[in-house]
Image (cartoon, helix red, strand yellow):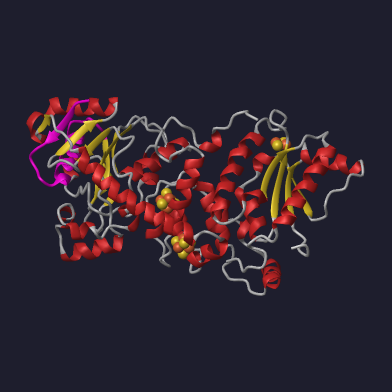
C-alpha cells in the first residue's frame, strides 16, 4: 500500500481538513460528512457539506463528539443514491456503522470512510468550558497532556483507537507528520487520483512511516486501564444487589438508549404499552414486596438492553455521557459485552463479513 | 432449604413441547406442581424480556422447551433461539445467576415420558439449589 504524508502543517486537523476540501473541490466525492462548527453551535456538529466554498468551519478532530454519529451517518446512506460521500469518523463510530450495516440499516456503497488515530474525547460540557477560555483548544489538545487527561473514562480505557474498516486511515501517533494510507481499494484509488489531481496543494508525498512501538505503548497503557476498570466493574455487577446499587439513581429517562448508536429499534419496547402498567398491576406489585419503586422496571430495562445489544456494543461511552444521574452505564455495558462477545466469538464492528451472532445459526446438535 | 418450594417457569412451544405435555397429561404422567407452563407459538419468539421478567419476579428457574432441530413448525425458530438463549445465559451469569437456572431442551410432540422426566429432573435440581437471589429482594 502506498502511504502519503502531509508536511505542510504541524496541526494534524489542518491536514485532514485540506484532504476533505480537496475531495470536494475535485469532485472525488459529492459531499462530506464531517464535524463542522457552524455559527450557532459551540460544539462542532456532524454536518453534510456539499459546497467547497462553505468548508471554513470544518473541525475534523476537535476533542469532542456530541454523540456517536453512526446513526446520523446511516441516515445519509440508508440506501444507495449514487451520491458519493466521504465520512470522517472516529474508530468507535465506524464500528457502530459496521454493526448498522449488518442490521440492514444502511449500505456502504456510496461511502468512503476516513478515520484517524483517536486520542479520545472530552464530555460536551467540559468541551464548552475549555472552549470558553481557550479558542485554540482543538489544536492545543494534541500537544497538551493536561488537556488529554480530561478525556472520558471510556476513552482512557479504550484500546481500539486505531481505525479499522476505514478506506483511508490517517495516522498521527508515532509520527510527526500525518500519514495517509489507503486501507482498501476504494481508499487507495481516492488517494492516488487526488494526489495526481492536486499535486502540490496538499503537499501529499509518497512515503511516511510510523513508529509502531509508540502506538503499541499507548495501546498497552489503555489496555491496562481497561483491565482495571473491567475487573472493578465486574465486582460492581456481580449480583442483582450490587447491580442495583449502581443503577439506584436511574430515572428511566432512556437517554442512554437514545444515545446508543447500536440500539437501533425505531420504537423501543420500553416506550410501548407493554411497560405502561395499569394501576391494579402497580398495586399488586407493591403488595407483593411491600414497596414498589417508581418508575418501575429500571433493572428490567438495563438488563434487557444489555441482553439485546451486548454483542454489538462498540464501547463508545456515549451512554455514560448522557446520563443525568452520573451512572457509569458504559462501564457495565463494556464489561458485560466484552465477555459476551468473547464467548460468542464475535467482535462488534470488526469483521463486516461476519453476520451478527443471532443470525449465524446452523443445524448442529 | 427443604422448606423452599421453588417457582419454575417453563416456556414451551405449541407444536412440540406443549403437545408432549398434553400427551403426558392424557397418559396420566404428572409433572411437579412448582412448574408453570407458558405456551408460546415457537421458541424462536422468545425474547430475553420473558426470561428476565421471570427471574426478576423471583422465578428460581426457567425451562425452555421446543421442537428438535429440523422439526420446528417455523423451520428454524429453534435454531435462532439457541444463540439468543446462550447469550442471555452468559449475561445472567455475570449478574450472579447460576447458569443451571436456565435450561433449553428439545422435546418432541410424541415424547410425553421425556417431558415428564425433564420436568422432574429440572424441578429437583432447582429445588436443591435453593432460593434465587431475587426471591425476597426489592427489584428496582
Ligand atoms: S451501550 Fe453505551 S458504550 Fe455500548 S455502544 Fe451503546 S452507547 Fe456506546
Ligand atoms: S441515562 Fe441514566 S438515568 Fe437515564 S435511563 Fe439511562 S441510566 Fe437511567
Ligand atoms: S415451533 Fe417448536 S420450536 Fe419452533
Give the total of numbered labels. Answer: 0
- Residue A26 is inside the magenta segment: yes
Task: Evaluate whether residue A263 shows in this view.
Answer: no
Which image quarter: residue A217?
top left
Q: In this view, which residue lies farthest toward the bottom?
A: A290
Quadrant housing residue B8: bottom right
Within the magenta stretch, is there residue A14? yes
Q: Quadrant of residue A91?
A: top left
Nearer the observer, A270 or A168:
A168
| Residue drawn at point x = 25 percent, y = 39 percent | A50
Where residue A223 sits in the image (x, y, percent)?
33, 48
Using the rendered image of the protein, determine whether residue B94 is visible from the camera's viewpoint. Answer: yes
Residue at point 9%, 34% (across, down): A203
Residue B39 x, y percent position in the rendering: 76, 46
- Residue placed most toward the observer, A270 or B125: B125
Where in the figure is residue A127, as x and y percent of width and height?
A: 25, 60
The quarter of the picture where the C terminus of chain B appears is bottom right
Q: Nearer the viewer, residue A344 or A103?
A: A344
Horizontally, residue A102 falls left or right of residue A273, namely left
Image location (x, y in percent) of residue B62: 69, 50
Closer to us: B127 or A63: B127
Which image quarter holds the N terminus of chain B? bottom right
Give the image quadrant in which the ligand numbered 3 is located.
Answer: top right
Residue at 14 percent across and 57 percent down: it is A136
Q: Residue at x 52, y 62 (%)?
A: A243
The residue segment tinted magenta is: A1-30
Amino acid at each position: 500500500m502506498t502511504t502519503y504524508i502531509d508536511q505542510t502543517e504541524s496541526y494534524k486537523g489542518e491536514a485532514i481538513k485540506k484532504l476533505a476540501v480537496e475531495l470536494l473541490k475535485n469532485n472525488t466525492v459529492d459531499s462530506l460528512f464531517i464535524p463542522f462548527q457552524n455559527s450557532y453551535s459551540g460544539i462542532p456538529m456532524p454536518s453534510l457539506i456539499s459546497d467547497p466554498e462553505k468548508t471554513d468551519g470544518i473541525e475534523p478532530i476537535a476533542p469532542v463528539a456530541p454523540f456517536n454519529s453512526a446513526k446520523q451517518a446511516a441516515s445519509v446512506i440508508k440506501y444507495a443514491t449514487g451520491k458519493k460521500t466521504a465520512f470522517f469518523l472516529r474508530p468507535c463510530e465506524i464500528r457502530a456503522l459496521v454493526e448498522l450495516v449488518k442490521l440492514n440499516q444502511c449500505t456502504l456503497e456510496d461511502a468512503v470512510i476516513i478515520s484517524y488515530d483517536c486520542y479520545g474525547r472530552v464530555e460536551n460540557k467540559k468541551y464548552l468550558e475549555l472552549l470558553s477560555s481557550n479558542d485554540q483548544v482543538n489544536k492545543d489538545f494534541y500537544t497538551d497532556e493536561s488537556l488529554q487527561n480530561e478525556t472520558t473514562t471510556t476513552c482512557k480505557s479504550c484500546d481500539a483507537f486505531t481505525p479499522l474498516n476505514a478506506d483511508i486511515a490517517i495516522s498521527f501517533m508515532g509520527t510527526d507528520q500525518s500519514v495517509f494510507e489507503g486501507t482498501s481499494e476504494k481508499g487507495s484509488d481516492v488517494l492516488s487520483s487526488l494526489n495526481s489531481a492536486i499535486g502540490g496543494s496538499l503537499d501529499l508525498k509518497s512515503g511516511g512511516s510510523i513508529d509502531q512501538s509508540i502506538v503499541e505503548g499507548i495501546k498497552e497503557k489503555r489496555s491496562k486501564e481497561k483491565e482495571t476498570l473491567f475487573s472493578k466493574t465486574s465486582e460492581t455487577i456481580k449480583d442483582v444487589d450490587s447491580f442495583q446499587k449502581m443503577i439506584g439513581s436511574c430515572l428511566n429517562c432512556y437517554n442512554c438508549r437514545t444515545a446508543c448508536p447500536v440500539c437501533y429499534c425505531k420504537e423501543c419496547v420500553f416506550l410501548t404499552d407493554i411497560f405502561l402498567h395499569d394501576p391494579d398491576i402497580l398495586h399488586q406489585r407493591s403488595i407483593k414486596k411491600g414497596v414498589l419503586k417508581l418508575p418501575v422496571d429500571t433493572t428490567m430495562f438495563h438488563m434487557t438492553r444489555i441482553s439485546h445489544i451486548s454483542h454489538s456494543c462498540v464501547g463508545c461511552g456515549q451512554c455514560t455521557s448522557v446520563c443525568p444521574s452520573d451512572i457509569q452505564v458504559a462501564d457495565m455495558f463494556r464489561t458485560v459485552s466484552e465477555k459476551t462477545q468473547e464467548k460468542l466469538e464475535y467482535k462488534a464492528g470488526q469483521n463486516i463479513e461476519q453476520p451478527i451472532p443471532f443470525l449465524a445459526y446452523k443445524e448442529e446438535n | 432449604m427443604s422448606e423452599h418450594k421453588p417457582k419454575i417457569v417453563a416456556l414451551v412451544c405449541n407444536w412440540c413441547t406443549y403437545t408432549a405435555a398434553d400427551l403426558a397429561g392424557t397418559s396420566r404422567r404428572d409433572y411437579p406442581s412448582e412448574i408453570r407452563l407458558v405456551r408460546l407459538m415457537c421458541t424462536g419468539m422468545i425474547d430475553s424480556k420473558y426470561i428476565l421478567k421471570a427471574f426478576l419476579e423471583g422465578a428460581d428457574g426457567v425451562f425452555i422447551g421446543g421442537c428438535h432441530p429440523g422439526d420446528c413448525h417455523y423451520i428454524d425458530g429453534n435454531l435462532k433461539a439457541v444463540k439468543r438463549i446462550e447469550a442471555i445465559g452468559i449475561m445472567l451469569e455475570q449478574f450472579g445467576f447460576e447458569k443451571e437456572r436456565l435450561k433449553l431442551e428439545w422435546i418432541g410432540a410424541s415424547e410425553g415420558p421425556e417431558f415428564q422426566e425433564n420436568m422432574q429432573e429440572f424441578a429437583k435440581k432447582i429445588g436443591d439449589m435453593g432460593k434465587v437471589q431475587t426471591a425476597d429482594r426489592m427489584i428496582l
